[in-house]
Image (cartoon, rainbow, N blue to C red):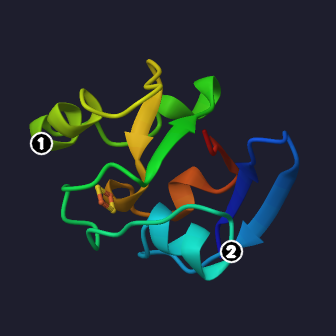
Amino acid sequence: MPKINFVKSDESIVTVEVPSGITLLQAAEDNNIGLSGPCGGNLACGHCHVVIDDEWFDKLPKLKEAEEDLLDMVWNVKPNSRLGCQIKITDDIDGIIVHIP
Ligand code: FES
């Protein structure tokens, strides 16, 4: 199972192992990381905003327009920002580092 390293706002790191195929948001919710998705992953809330570590950002599939549009409205957005509900966990991103803003 792929590992995800969540870096919380207090800089503590929580490493979890999750099944392939779930979203980054689900992985965070299942492990009480402190990320929520009130819209159920329907690109309507932006609460699942995360910042992907530099070395991992380009390994993810590119943003689609709808995700980009919503990120434009999210507070504290960074060049490596993504929405956790739009990122599928696969073996290709085993070890990814994800910052919780
Ligand atoms: S859960 Fe609402 S936009 Fe991701």
Q: Is residue 18 left or right of residue 39?
A: right
Q: Residue 78 location in percent, x, y?
A: 47, 21
Label 1 lies in ligand 1 vicinity (Cβ under 8 Å):
no
- Residue at the farthest right position: 12
Residue type at mark 2 is Asn
Question: Where is 82 relative to 32, above or below?
Answer: above
Comparing 73 with 14, the one in front is: 73
Q: Are marks 1 and 2 in contact (CB under 8 Å)?
A: no
Res. 51 mark? none
Q: Residue 68 location in percent, x, y?
A: 21, 32
Question: Where is 73 relative to 97, above or below?
Answer: above
**Which quadrant would residue 16 be assigned to in this image?**
bottom right
Q: Name the residue carrying label 2.
A: 32
Labels 1 and 2: the sequence-earlier one? 2
**Which quadrant would residue 100 be assigned to in this image?**
top right
In this rendering, which labeled residue sits more in front, label 1 or label 2? 2
Q: Name the residue carrying label 1.
A: 66
SS at mark 2 in the image: loop
Q: Residue 29 location in percent, x, y?
A: 56, 74
- The quadrant the C terminus occupies is top right
Crowd around label 1: few <14 · some 14–19 · many ≥20 (10 Å): few
